[in-house]
Image (cartoon, grey):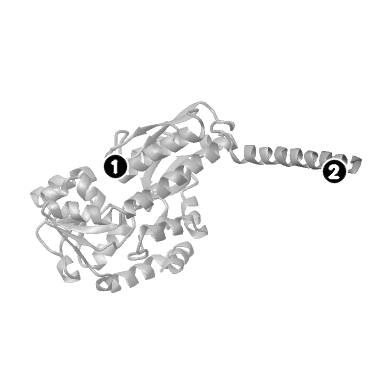
Amino acid sequence: MKKFLSFAAMLMLLLVLAACNDDEEIAGDNVSAGSGDYPEVTFKLAHITPTDHMWHQASEKFKEELESITDGKMSVEIYPASQLGSEADMVQQVEAGSVDMAMITAAYLTSRTPEMAAWFAPYLFETLEEANTAAQSDLGQQVLKKVEGTGLKGLTYLFAGQRTMVTKGVKINSTDDLNGLKLRVTPSPVLQSFYKNAGAAPESISLTEVYSALQTGVIDGMDMDLDATITNKYSEIAKYVAVTNHMVWPSTILTNEKKFNALSQDAQDAVTQAWKVASDYAVTTRSGQEQEFRKELESQGMEVYDLDASLFAKQIEAFDSEYGGQSDLIKQFIEANR
């Protein structure tokens, strides 16, 4: 009887200890929101796109996630649609610390950070998911790190749709149709080189002037993604969309390096995690909208059609040779993803 009672007592003790251990594990796996070292702060975030564009939606996702992680201690004020100026203005504001974060296109940064040209190798990625994977790779992060040196820090990349060719009166069926065509292309030599090699005449026009330029015949069309074609109402003037998907269109999330480094590790981790959620959200959401956007543009009277990459084999080879020869990092990035 004594042996039985002793055994029973020992069994009860083991059960109690096991239960305590389980409670500790459960408590460790469910850290409550806001339990870290988070300052009471509201970040100013600026970007150039309208509020119905994916990048603004991703901004709102970042705000939502950051506030959730920190239990509202860290928040965000978003300034969309170039409210705080051009991309050049925003970069200067981030450098000065008057704006905390800005979405700056990799295209704009090519003039400051030549390695960003790697992202514009034509037909390097078939899908946004592939591009997002490359962004998180060691080579992608090396390219992002190149923005540092003037007080900037790159936090991550954010993707919108891939590039297409939108035209008013000329349907592009081959590179011959591009010959002499005046197309608005983001004023970056690396982007314009693709079109020059195809025989087009790239025009550097501010995005805010594209609608009127197309309307008045100053340009014949533009290099644009489906998102912006819809949000900027280009279907009111343009007739054709050649869905080439010849380049991805990354934005970088830049912050002031000194101010970011002054945050606690918990706060830095919260910002990084919130942007990862927002970035993944943008890719997943945008990838699922391709057919929806095509149908919407067709319903607005546009002819939307595919154009095969094989038509641009010479332009692909020319880009890889020219820009791969300028930087080992660009060459490695292209070779790793081609």
Q: Position of residue 18 (x, y in %)?
A: 73, 42
Where's residue 212, x and y in %? 13, 45
Of 273 and 112, nearer the camera is: 273
* Mark toward the start of the polypeptide (1 vs 2): 2
Name the foreground residue: 90 vs 309. 309
Q: Residue at 16% of width from left, 69% of height from top?
A: 173
Left or right: residue 262 versus residue 178 is right
Q: What amino acid is found at the position of numbered circle 2 in the picture?
A: Phe
Q: Quadrant of the C terminus?
A: bottom left
Q: Which part of the image, by quadrant, shows the N terminus?
A: top right
Query: Residue 175 occupies which quadrant of the picture?
Result: bottom left
Q: CA distance from mark 1 to mark 2?
A: 71 Å
Q: Which residue is label 2 attached to?
A: 7
The kind of residue on which mark 1 rests is Thr
**Left or right for 190, reference 326:** left
**As drawn, is 242 to the left or to the right of 252?**
left
**Direction front: furthest residue:** 1
Can residue 309 be seen here? The reply is yes
Quadrant in which residue 310 is drawn: bottom left
Residue in the image at 21% along x and 42% along y: 208
Q: In the rendering, which numbered label is found on residue 49?
A: 1
Q: Count neighbours of disc 2 (C-alpha within 10 A) and say few if under 14, some if 14 to 19, many if 20 or more.
A: few
Tag 1 and tag 2, C-beta contact below 8 Å:
no
Q: Secondary structure at mark 1?
A: loop
Q: Is residue 280 above or below residue 23?
A: below
Q: Residue 281 location in percent, x, y?
A: 39, 47
- Of residues 150 and 139, the one nearer the viewer is 139
